[in-house]
């Protein structure tokens, strides 16, 4: 009986840890999409957060747009890994702008590198998770100026996927 147990326990533990590892990765990927959607919605209706933010301002961004990075942090439940945020503002013709106008586009991009707990299992895309949401701006004060910005991309990565136009 001890021999059978020894033969079964190793594959059983590998299977169990694999389920846990991929479950955490899947949870983080869903959380990342949820966070980007909530952040884009808050920005589209100009709901600037009044929450205490435990992160620094978004480099290059105005105060309102930096507050969206706080919304992203509070709306994105991650089990493992750090969150990087990029916010871009586009005009009606999809060109980068600083004019916050109704009908323009707010682009929220979130990126996180999911760190493997065991190192035994290959994660999709090397553990890199990305989410990009474009949402029409619905609320703006006349002449309101805002500047987008972004955190530095994690080591070895870049924000090119965020700026690239999707395939149609």
Image (spheres, rainbow, N blue to C red):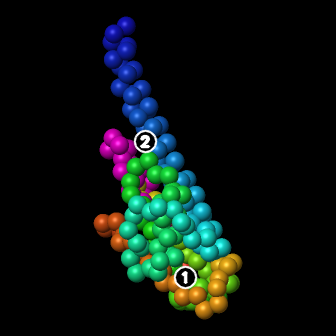
User: Would residue 135 be counted in the magenta stretch?
Assistant: no
Q: Nearer the viewer, residue 99 or 8?
A: 99
At 38% across and 54% down in the image, what residue appears?
A: 81
Say which label, 2 or 1, has the lower sequence index.
Answer: 2
Q: Quadrant of residue 166?
A: bottom right
* Residue, disc 2: 21
Residue 163 seen by the camera:
no
Q: Secondary structure at mark 1?
A: strand
At 58% across and 77% down in the image, what residue appears?
A: 106
Q: Secondary structure at mark 2?
A: helix
Q: Nearer the viewer, residue 50 or 39?
A: 50
The answer for how far apart the CA atoms under marks 2 and 1 are is 36 Å
Please state which of the two labelled residues, at mark 2 or mark 1, is closer to the viewer.
1
Instruction: Give the magenta part as a residue range.
Output: 109-126
Mark 1 burial class by Cα count in 10 Å: few <14, some 14-19, many 20+: many
Q: Position of residue 161 (x, y in %)?
A: 47, 73
Residue 84 seen by the camera:
yes
Say above or below: 64 vs 49: below
Counting every numbered tag in the picture gives 2
Q: Position of residue 70 (x, y in %)?
A: 48, 65
At 50% across and 76% down in the image, what residue appears?
A: 65
């Amino acid at each position: 009986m001890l021999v059978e147990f020894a033969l079964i326990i190793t594959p059983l533990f590998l299977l169990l840890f694999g389920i846990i590892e991929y479950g955490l990765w899947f949870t983080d990927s869903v959380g990342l999409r949820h966070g980007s959607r909530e952040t884009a919605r808050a920005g589209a209706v100009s709901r600037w957060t009044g929450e205490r933010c435990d992160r620094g301002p978004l480099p290059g961004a105005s105060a309102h747009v930096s507050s969206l990075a706080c919304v992203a942090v509070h709306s994105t439940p991650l089990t493992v890994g750090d969150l990087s945020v990029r916010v871009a503002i586009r005009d009606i013709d999809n060109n980068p702008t600083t004019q916050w106008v109704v009908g323009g586009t707010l682009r929220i991009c979130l990126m996180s590198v999911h760190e493997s707990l065991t190192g035994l299992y290959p994660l999709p895309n090397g553990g890199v998770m990305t989410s990009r949401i474009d949402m029409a701006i619905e609320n703006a004060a006349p002449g309101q100026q805002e500047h987008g910005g972004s955190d530095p991309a994690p080591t070895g990565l870049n924000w090119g996927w965020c700026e690239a136009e999707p395939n149609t």
